[in-house]
Image (cartoon, helix red, strand yellow):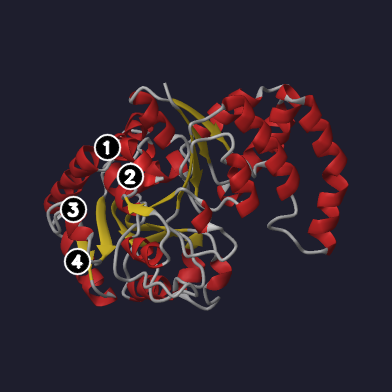
Amino acid sequence: MQHILFLLEDYNYFYTHQTNAILKTNGNTKYSAILNNLTAKKYYQADSMAKAFQKLGYFTSIIVPEANPLQLLWAKQNNKLAYFKWLLQKPMRSFKSRFLKQHRNSYNSIQFHVLLQQVKTIKPDVIYFYSNIFITQKQIETLKKYSKKIVLQWTCPIWNIIPYSSFDLIITAAIQLKEYFDAKKINSIYIQQAFDDSIIDQLLPKNKQYKGDVVFIGNFALGHTYRFEVLEYLLQNNIDLTIYGSGKNYVPKTSLVHNKIQPGLFGIDMYNEYQNYKMAIHIHTTGFENDGINWDKYAGAKRLFEITGSGTLFLTTHQQNIKDLYEIDKEVVTFKNAEELLQKINYYLTHPLEAETIAKNGRLRTLKNHSFTVRAIELEPILFSTTHL
């Protein structure tokens, strides 16, 4: 049976910080125990796609190549030569980081060495990169000696340092990115993101004694001006709005939004919190970022599936392909501007049964058409077909 190796991004340094915390409590914890414990928390991509392919009968493995304490622990417990090499190179990594300001790639050489030893041990048929993992063209070529196909899942703004054309295939949930890669003659396919239906079994029972009316969970950055403007407008109009997210420094300190932002939520904590509100909103990145791609036009965010999968009424900015994913006003609710969003929030607050019906329908559609199991079935013939090489 064929083997897929999933490489996860150390999103917000979650795996780094959590590994350090676990090892501080018990320095003898096994690498596999820590990895299994952390992926079970469903933080960002986690093990969802790996579990879905396991259901189809495939062998899967997971590595977080930029989580330094986790990777060092693997080397210590499985490859002493790699472990001592890491320790010997540590002063040079520190020098690069502190004085040459090479924060993004200061650990890259030794990180890749450990990853390569893991790949040689696993012998995967497919290596599947999830998003923002630093890799060079030369390193990809090295990995190709030990795997039949190297693929990248990418639905973020373009990074000039990523050698996109070196991958055998790019999987994207953004139609605009598919168009970008097509123009560059880079092999890519469009497949939407998904919801991990196993999360439902881990959620607390939904309590109808809601914490509040509306919740927004998401980050603030340079491309999120419209996001801030919409949330500020809702607060100015006295909507009971709770906000969780990072990037508070990108928001004006005198704004209502700035005073409302609480630390970001992820994984199981995030899904449970969605259930505590009558409705949740999503506001996509807008306009043309520095990559020249229009992010207004098409939807490709994980929030579509995270919120509907949680069983909470989902209100999202209108984008062309929403209608291809959900039935509007029956399974999800869309809005074209802040004024329309305010109107719809007030409407559904006074029509709770209608809101609950839409939320229920949205969850049913997500479980039927947008689970990771469905995505794995869509991906299976593509990952293991020579026509996409």
The kind of residue tagged 1 is Val
Q: Position of residue 34 (x, y in %)?
A: 61, 28
Q: Which residue is mark 3?
A: 326
Query: Visible in this render: residue 111?
Result: yes
Q: Which residue is mark 1?
A: 374
Rounded to the nearest angstrom, the CA distance separating label 2 from label 4 is: 26 Å
Q: Which residue is mark 2?
A: 194
The kind of residue tagged 4 is Lys
Q: Is residue 314 left or right of residue 196?
A: left
Residue 344's label in the rendered image is 4
Rounded to the nearest angstrom, the CA distance separating label 4 from label 3 is: 18 Å
Q: Position of residue 95 (x, y in %)?
A: 86, 56
User: Closest to the observer: 49 or 339?
Assistant: 49
Residue depth check, mark 2 versus mark 4: number of the one nearer the observer: 2
Residues tagged 1 and 2 counted as in contact (Cβ below 8 A): yes
Dot placed on the residue nearer the N-terminal end, 2 or 4: 2
Please report the residue visible at 38 percent of the width from the left and 68 percent of the height from the top.
183
Rounded to the nearest angstrom, the CA distance separating label 1 from label 2 is: 8 Å
Query: Does 59 appear above or below 366?
Result: above
Q: Position of residue 191 (x, y in %)?
A: 31, 49
Rounded to the nearest angstrom, the CA distance separating label 1 from label 3 is: 15 Å
Dot placed on the residue nearer the N-terminal end, 4 or 3: 3
